[in-house]
Structure formats: C-alpha cells, structure tokens
Image (cartoon, rainbow, N blue to C red):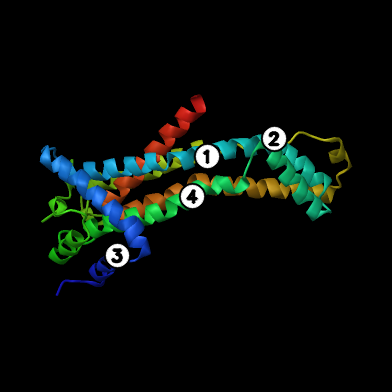
Amino acid sequence: MHFSFVAFALLFMLEPNFFTTTFVFPILNLLVVFYKVFLFIKIPGAFGLAIICLTAFIRLLLHPFFKQQLETSKKMQDLKPHLDRISHKHKDDKKRLQEEHMKLYQQAGINPAAGCLFMIVQIPVFIALYNTLSLFLLNGNATKIISQINKVLYHPALKIQTIDPWFFGFNLALAPNKAGHWYYYLLPVITAILQYFQTAVMTPAAPTTPEVSVAKKDTPEVKDKKDNGGDFQKAMNMQMKFIFPLMIGYFSYTLPVGLSLYWNIFSLFSIIQYKKMKSS
C-alpha cells in the first residue's frame, strides 16, 4: 500500500528502451559491481564508496571530451580580439562576417561546435546516473524495487537483497532537509562551494579587446551599445559564478545525500583535471 507514485516512476526507469538499455542498465550494473567488491572485502560504507568509484570512472571516461572542450575554449579566448575586430569591420555585412569568422576558425584549427561536445555527451550520462541512484536512494530498500533491479543485472552473481545506505555517519538515502541532524546541513554548503570553484576555474576571464583606429570614430551611441554588451556579459558571468552554485546547493539540500556525493566527486575531478591541464 506504501508503493507510491515515486516508486512507480522508479520502476518505469527499469523498463527496457533505448535510453535505459544504453545508459541506465550499464551504469546500474557497474554500480552494483563496485558495491559487491566493497562488500566482499568488508569495507564500511560500501555503497558510498561504490558511488565514488562509479563517478570517478564516468568522469575519466568523459575526460577526452572535457579536454577537447578546454582546448577549444582556450583557442576561442585567444581569438576573441581578432573576432571582435572582424565583427566591427563587417558589422553591416552578415554574410561576409560569417565567412571571415569561419576562415579564422579554420586557420586556428577550431571547430566551434566541439566546445559543446562535453556538455552534450554528459547530459544522458548525468540523467542515467541520477536515475540509477534514485532507484536506490529515493525508495530505500523496497522489495519490489530490489526485485526489479535484479532482473536487469547482467549476471546472477550481482543480485542483491538489500542496500546499506550508511556512509561515515550519513544516511545516503536521506535529504538534508529531512535528516534532522545539523551536520547534514553542511553538505549543501560544501556542494555549493565546490560548484563555485568549478565554475570559477572553468570560466575564463574575458580578454581585453585591443583598441583599433576605427574605434576612434565610434559615435556615443555605438560606445553605449558596446558598454551595454560588456555589462550583459559580466552579468551573465556573475550569474554563472554565484547563482548556479546556490541553485545546486539548494538541490543538494532537498535531494538524498547520495546524489550530492556523486555531484561533489564529479566537481572535484573537474577542478583537479582542469588545474592539471592548465599547469602542463
């Protein structure tokens, strides 16, 4: 009788279709493999460690796309002064402007679409990760959910009877706003801080456009538009840097701790890999 709408939605995630077969089932099986390994070697907090290992594995798997995004972003930043000059020179001829931009991209060996590849690739992976963890964390150890999970595992040896959600004093199935303990409230703060640093290191400072002789002929109206454009870009950067981390922090306040755990590990890997690539 306690089989709620949430449980029904979670069971729907286990219905075979293209998305679940391609993304959810492999991630689910990999999570159970890690969980079984930690159970076998009798390490406390097996499920939390399994989430960490799964997140690290996914992050490393996506590293080539992440690296390509950073390289494209760096090249685009270096090209910005040249793009600005071309935009000013051909502002009244959109076709010529596009041709000149594309020519500059080709000379620099840049595919503008490649910068979005990391975001595009990780979207289905994130959804699959969320769905996989939700199966365990949003419905506890419901017998029907466990039974359905066992049906999509690739080998009988992976079958589970229950999941222990405790990880170093935290119940991974509880949301901080429902936990009733003060130390749970630290997790949304940590999540927001990590997201802030991830956004900060991955948002390059806007390059200063060198002055050109044509700029001297700018009318006050043109200068006004440039200033407004710069202000808009600064406002967008500020929103990404502060509002987005606060939003993620709020999500981690209302969602189970296990979901915050994988989000934070992903952020840590992003920060470390970015710093490593910048120093190399």
**What is the x, y in percent for residue 12?**
28, 69
Q: Residue at x 33, y 51 (%)?
A: 252
Q: Position of residue 229 (x, y in %)?
A: 70, 49
Reading the image, the residue beneath label 2 is: 208
Q: Dot 1 lies on which element?
A: helix
User: Counting residues from the N terminus, which is met first, the one under dot 1 or under dot 4?
Assistant: 1
Badge 3 crowding class, 10 Å Cα cut-off, few under 14, some 14 to 19, many 20 or more, is some
Q: Is residue 107 left or right of residue 113?
A: right
Q: Amino acid at mark 4?
A: Met
Question: Which is more foreground, mark 2 or mark 1?
Answer: 1
- Return the residue at label 3: 13
Question: Is residue 174 among what the camera can see?
Answer: yes
Local secondary structure at mark 2: loop
3D distance between C-alphas at marks 1 and 4? 11 Å
Mark 1 lies on residue = 68
Question: Looking at the image, which residue is at 84% across and 48% down?
Answer: 220
